Image (cartoon, helix red, strand yellow):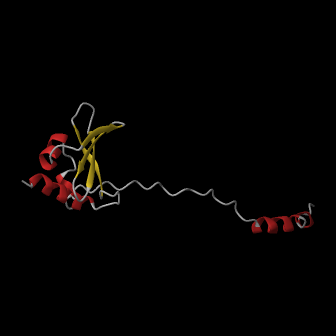
Amino acid sequence: MIRRGPLLLPLVPALLLAGCATPAPKPATAPPPVAPKPVKIHEAGLERVMGKTKAQLVALFGEADLDGHEGQAQRLQFVGPACVLDAYLYPARAGSEPVVTYVDARTPSGEDMDRASCIASLSRRSAAP
């Protein structure tokens, strides 16, 4: 006859301790990256320049005060009494004519300015006699 009871008794404390073990922590996962918000083309006033070509900007504001390149972008700068507007043009696809994809506005002293207000101010500049 085989006695099983006393042989299992030494295993009881080990089994009780195994039940108290804490599980290994899960590796922390970083939150997914937040995609930058696209520029709202229909933001009041910006639709007048976003997606426009150099010729269309010149028709709207007159000749650019500065026409240069920064990397692959063409930068057109229009200066008025109230503000300075930088328009950055990139080709939508290889071989296509560059169009405005971003604009930046500031006062003549260099402080940030509302872009739509600057566009409106420069539009009046070209309409003045």
39 or 21, which lies in front? Answer: 39
| Res 73 visible | no
61 or 7, which lies in front? Answer: 61
Left or right: 1 in relation to 35:
right
Q: Residue furthest top?
A: 95
- Quadrant of the rendering where the N terminus is positioned: bottom right
Q: Position of residue 11 (x, y in %)?
A: 86, 64
**Is the residue 58 above or below the residue 38 in the image?**
above
**Is the residue 51 above or below the residue 42 in the image?**
above
Q: Position of residue 35 (x, y in %)?
A: 40, 53
Q: Residue at x 12, y 52 (%)?
A: 126
Q: Position of residue 129 (x, y in %)?
A: 6, 53
**Is the residue 65 above or below the residue 121 in the image?**
above
Quadrant in the picture for residue 46: bottom left
Quadrant in the picture for residue 55: top left
| Labels in figure, total | 0
Q: Residue at x 9, y 55 (%)?
A: 128
Q: Position of residue 102 (x, y in %)?
A: 29, 49
106 or 5, which lies in front? Answer: 106
| Res 19 visible | yes
Q: Residue at x 32, y 37 (%)?
A: 69
Left or right: 35 in relation to 68:
right
